[in-house]
Amino acid sequence: MSDPRVDASVDTFNDGSGFFVRTEIEARAVAIDGPFPDLQTAQRLQADQLAYVKQASQALKEQLQKATATSPAASTSR
């Protein structure tokens, strides 16, 4: 597995009606597992992995939403 990567950036911009603070957080992880002895085994593990990744992705999404919703800029703009 490659090292998971998280890239973040924060900038400001003006759209003519006011100033904004933009926060971007991107996460990426790549894993290649195997080799497996046959196609059926690989396909079964692929299905298992898909279910796992769906749950893990939802947890990450919730954490990202929490991180941006509770930031100093978000708290001040409300």
Image (cartoon, rainbow, N blue to C red):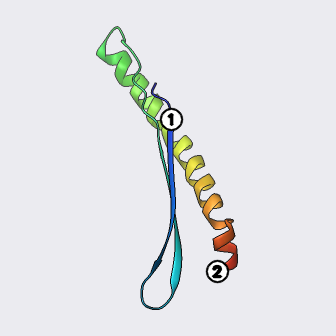
As displayed, is residue 13 above or below residue 61? below
Q: Residue furthest bottom?
A: 17
- Count the numbered circles shown: 2
- Amino acid at the residue labelled 2: Ser
Q: Is mark 1 on a helix, strand or loop?
A: loop
Residue 38 is left or right of residue 14, and the answer is left
Tell me where residue 55 appears, x and y as whole percent. 55, 42
Quarter of the view holding residue 35: top left
Disc 2 crowd rating (10 Å Cα; few below 14, some 14-19, many 20+) is: few
Q: Name the residue under label 2.
A: 77
- Amino acid at the residue labelled 1: Pro
Residue at left offset 52%, top offset 53%: 8
Q: Which mark is residue 12?
A: none
Q: Name the residue under label 1.
A: 4
Q: Which residue lies furthest to the top in this view?
A: 37
Residue 38 is left or right of residue 77, and the answer is left
